[in-house]
Image (cartoon, grey):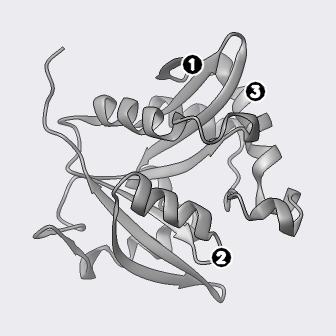
Amino acid sequence: MEFRRAKLEDIPAILDVQAANFIGNLEDTERRDGFLSVKFTRQQLEEMTGDVGIIVAAIGGSLAGFLCASSCEFNRPFPLLAAMMQRFNAIDYQGRSLASSRVFIYGPVCIERAYRGRGLLRRLYETLQREVAGRYDIGVAFVAEDNPHSLRVHLDGLGMAHVGEFALSGKQYHILAFDVPGETTS
């Protein structure tokens, strides 16, 4: 399995995995294992590859999973993310205000169902950490209240911290944060 920064030729496979795991395309029973709350267009994913980046897990010619990361500036046009970022002035993480820190947005992340439970999320996360080391101070994610699987994985599995909550259109979301390592040497 290869963990690397996405290339433009990975976008069609990312779109396929995204569609297969988007909340609107899943039955209630399928949502228990996690789901995506947002759906990006091809153009948005292409822009994201040039922004903070997308990390992919590739096996052979197939995409096993992906992890998106983007700047706050990239996310301002999205109402859901704008609602979360409005809370940054009121949130401190380990003595640092989110509003005054170099912050990027983590997510969405999605692992193909056939590859879940094999440690891919941790490897995607570790690859992302190396990619953003020294460029950002804090990563911030959100998880929908009705997605307990994702919340548990990010809090317990990756050690992210719950730092706040927000609501949009009557739906509740958790805000999670994590440290980004300083500059690394290769």
Identify the mark nearer the N-term, 2 or 3.
3
Work out how far the residue at label 2 is from the one at label 3, CA to CA, in angstroms. 28 Å
Question: In which quarter of the view is residue 133 placed?
Answer: top left
Element under label 2? loop
For residue 12, the mark is 3
For residue 64, the mark is none
Q: Are marks 2 and 3 in contact (CB under 8 Å)?
A: no
Identify the mark nearer the N-term, 1 or 3.
1
Three-letter amino acid code at disc 3? Answer: Pro
In the image, residue 113 sits, relative to residue 84, either above or below, namely above
x then y, percent, for residue 142: 48, 65
Identify the mark nearer the N-term, 1 or 2.
1
Q: Say if residue 48 shows up in the picture.
A: yes
x then y, percent, for residue 129: 31, 36
Element under label 3? helix
Work out how far the residue at label 1 is from the one at label 3, CA to CA, in angstroms. 11 Å
In the image, residue 184 sits, relative to residue 23, either above or below, namely above
